[in-house]
């Protein structure tokens, strides 16, 4: 008698646990993946294009153009090395390569990659500084504002996150940003704004 009672309770508990796991799995897979650095195939293609431009500049014997294209090739190659370091979970190596790339040629995509590497390495102050530079140079860069919100959320600064999420959402409406904004407003007990 006692064994059947425990068996029934065990079945109920295990079905509850299974249901909870399924619900969590559906929630996790329904969310968009976190932003990643620009894909390597895209960088490979950009690098190949720049190499072709460099060859054309050499054929035209255009020294200034050769210099410009060579710098772009070097910056893209360093970003590719940064991506390799990210794949190896070597955040510091990635940060070094992305920083070197930006020293050669400043770009929004390069700065975005650097911010993500800082975030993955738990260096939120540096990430915030770079993200601020990104939106200062490109105030309409919704990805930059989204990064600022992610940094603020990671540091527990919900009010700052709301401001950045709102700005990102105005520039580029999307469901994930709207959901995160609503969730953050509810956490701040601002139901009327959520």
Image: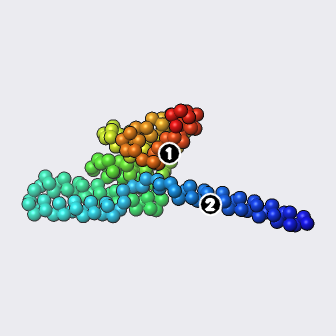
Residue 153 location in percent, x, y?
51, 41
Left/right of residue 14 with respect to residue 121 in the rendered view: right
Residue for badge 2: 22
- Number of residues whose C-alpha sits closer than 10 Å to that of mark 1, classed few (under 14), some (14–19) or many (20 or more): few
Question: Residue at 40% across / 38% down in the picture?
Answer: 167
Q: Secondary structure at mark 1?
A: helix
| Residue occupying image coordinates x 19% and y 63% | 52
Q: Looking at the picture, how far across and down is residue 127, in whole percent?
A: 43, 44
Residue closest to the far front? 192
- Can you identify the residue that label 1 sits on? 179
Sort mark 2 into few (<14), some (14-19) or many (20+) by Cα contacts within 10 Å. Answer: few
Q: Is 55 placed above or below 108 here?
A: below
Q: Earlier in the sequence, mark 2 or mark 1?
A: 2
**View extreme (left): residue:** 60
Instruction: Identify the image quadrant of the N terminus.
Output: bottom right
Q: Is residue 164 left or right of residue 157?
A: left
Q: Are marks 2 and 1 in contact (CB under 8 Å)?
A: no
The location of residue 18, given as percent across then percent down, is 68, 62
Residue 72 point in image, percent of width and height: 24, 55
Q: Secondary structure at mark 2?
A: helix
């Amino acid at each position: 008698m006692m064994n059947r009672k425990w068996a029934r309770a065990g079945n109920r508990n295990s079905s509850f646990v299974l249901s909870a796991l399924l619900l969590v799995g559906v929630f996790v897979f329904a969310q968009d993946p976190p932003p990643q650095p620009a894909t390597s195939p895209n960088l490979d293609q950009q690098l190949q294009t720049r190499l072709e431009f460099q060859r054309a500049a050499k054929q035209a014997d255009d020294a200034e153009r050769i210099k410009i294209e060579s710098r772009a090739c070097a910056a893209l190659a360093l970003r590719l090395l940064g991506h390799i370091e990210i794949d190896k979970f070597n955040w510091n190596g990635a940060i070094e390569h992305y920083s070197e790339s930006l020293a050669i040629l400043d770009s929004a995509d390069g700065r975005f990659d650097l911010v993500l590497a800082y975030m993955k390495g738990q260096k939120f102050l540096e990430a915030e500084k770079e993200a601020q530079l990104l939106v200062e140079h490109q105030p309409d860069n919704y990805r930059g504002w989204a990064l600022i919100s992610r940094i603020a959320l990671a540091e527990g600064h919900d009010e700052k996150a709301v401001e950045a999420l709102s700005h990102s959402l105005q520039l580029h409406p999307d469901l994930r940003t709207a959901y995160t904004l609503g969730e953050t407003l509810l956490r701040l007990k601002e139901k009327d704004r959520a």
